[in-house]
Image (cartoon, rainbow, N blue to C red):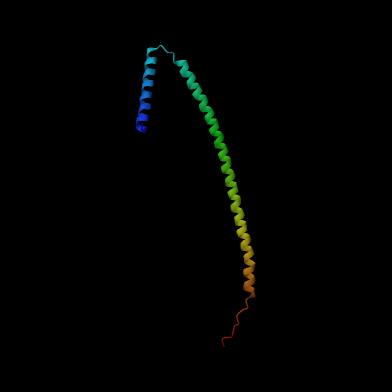
């Protein structure tokens, strides 16, 4: 059985169940309101629980993101300090190199 046939049969089954339910409700022999109220109230409770769980996950993710941003900032600052220290360490060596060279002799133009 291919996918199209499978989903077509599922759809037809849903249509049949819906039609039978509509017939049963229209005849008035079934008191569906209490059952429907219980189902809806259960669905609302389930929704509230799911929203609370999602909210908890959102808070946890926000905490993780905030911590990651702080660590990234600390790494950037540490890298900048290392670069500044390396530049300072290289600066005296360059000054020593300049001082070690003798000045060129200047001859008078006259």
Which residue is found at the position 57% from the left and 46% from the top?
Answer: 69
Q: How far across and how far down the image is residue 32, in percent?
A: 44, 15
Picture quadrant of residue 4? top left
Picture quadrant of residue 108? bottom right
Q: Say left or right for 96 vs 47.
A: right
- Total labels: the figure holds 0
Q: Say left or right for 81 vs 29.
A: right
Q: Nearer the viewer, residue 80 or 21?
A: 21
Q: How far across and how far down the image is residue 99, in percent?
A: 64, 74
Which residue is found at the position 56% from the left and 39% from the top?
Answer: 61
Q: Nearer the viewer, residue 18 or 66?
A: 18
Taking the view exactly as shown, the residue that stands out farthest to the bottom is: 110
**Quarter of the image with the N terminus in it:** top left
Q: Is residue 107 above or below residue 84?
A: below
Q: Say left or right for 67 vs 28.
A: right
**Quarter of the image with the C terminus in it:** bottom right
Q: Is residue 39 above or below residue 103?
A: above
Taking the view exactly as shown, the residue that stands out farthest to the top is: 29
Q: Is residue 101 above or below residue 54?
A: below
Which residue is found at the position 60% from the left and 53% from the top?
Answer: 77
Q: Nearer the viewer, residue 101 or 23?
A: 23
Which residue is found at the position 61% from the left and 63% from the top?
Answer: 87
Q: How far across and how far down the image is residue 34, in percent?
A: 47, 15
């Amino acid at each position: 059985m291919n996918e199209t046939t499978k989903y077509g049969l599922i759809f037809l089954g849903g249509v049949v169940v819906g039609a039978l339910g509509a017939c049963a409700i229209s005849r008035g022999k079934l008191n569906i309101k209490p059952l429907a109220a219980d189902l809806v109230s259960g669905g609302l409770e389930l929704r509230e629980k799911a929203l609370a769980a999602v909210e908890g996950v959102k808070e946890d993710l926000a905490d993780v993101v905030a911590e990651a941003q702080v660590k990234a900032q600390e790494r950037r600052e540490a890298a900048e300090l290392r670069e500044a220290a390396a530049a300072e360490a290289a600066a005296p060596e360059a000054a020593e190199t300049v001082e070690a060279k003798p000045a060129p002799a200047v001859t008078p133009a006259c």
